[in-house]
Image (tube, grey):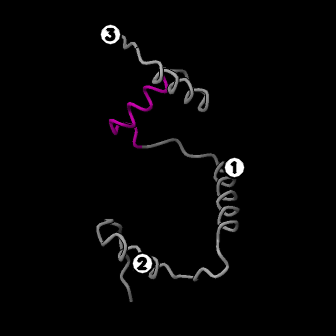
Amino acid sequence: MAITIRNQKTEELIRKIGRRTGEGPSAVVRRLAEREAGINDNPKPVAPEIVKMRMQRLEELRLKHTHPDDPKLSWDEIEQEMDSIFGDDLDLPRKPRG
């Protein structure tokens, strides 16, 4: 049985995603439905050139928005700060402190 989308905003969103990803409407709906259902837990790997571009952009943003007086915290200090803000309920794997 075919599904007809009768909501114009939803249809526009599907087409917008399809233009961005190069997929047709059915492929967009299927991919998003599989993700929501937890079926497609192995996403396609990101191309190395895309990773490199994104990492460069992140570095540019870090340099642009880092205050020169920001403290240089160790990872343990960052974890302690996160725990003080959010509690220890993030359920992140912890390495033994020593």
Q: Decide whether residue 22 is among the magenta residues.
A: no
Check if mark 3's residue and mark 1's residue have beta carbons within 8 Å: no
Q: Secondary structure at mark 3?
A: loop
Q: Residue at x 48, y 42 (%)?
A: 43
| Mark closer to the observer (3, 2) | 2
Q: Secondary structure at mark 2?
A: helix
Q: Which residue is mark 2?
A: 81
Q: CA distance from mark 3 to mark 2?
A: 53 Å
Q: Which residue is mark 3?
A: 1
Q: Decide whether residue 34 is among the magenta residues.
A: yes
How would you rate the neighbour count of disc 3 (Cα within 10 Å): few for under 14, some for 14-19, many for 20 or more?
few
The tag earlier along the polypeptide, 3 or 1, is 3
Which x, y percent locates residue 17? 55, 30
Q: Secondary structure at mark 1?
A: helix
Q: Residue at x 64, y 60 (%)?
A: 58
Query: Height in image: 7 above or below 45?
Result: above
The part of the image, by quadrant, that contains residue 57 is bottom right
Task: Give the residue type at disc 3.
Answer: Met
Q: Which mark is residue 49?
A: 1
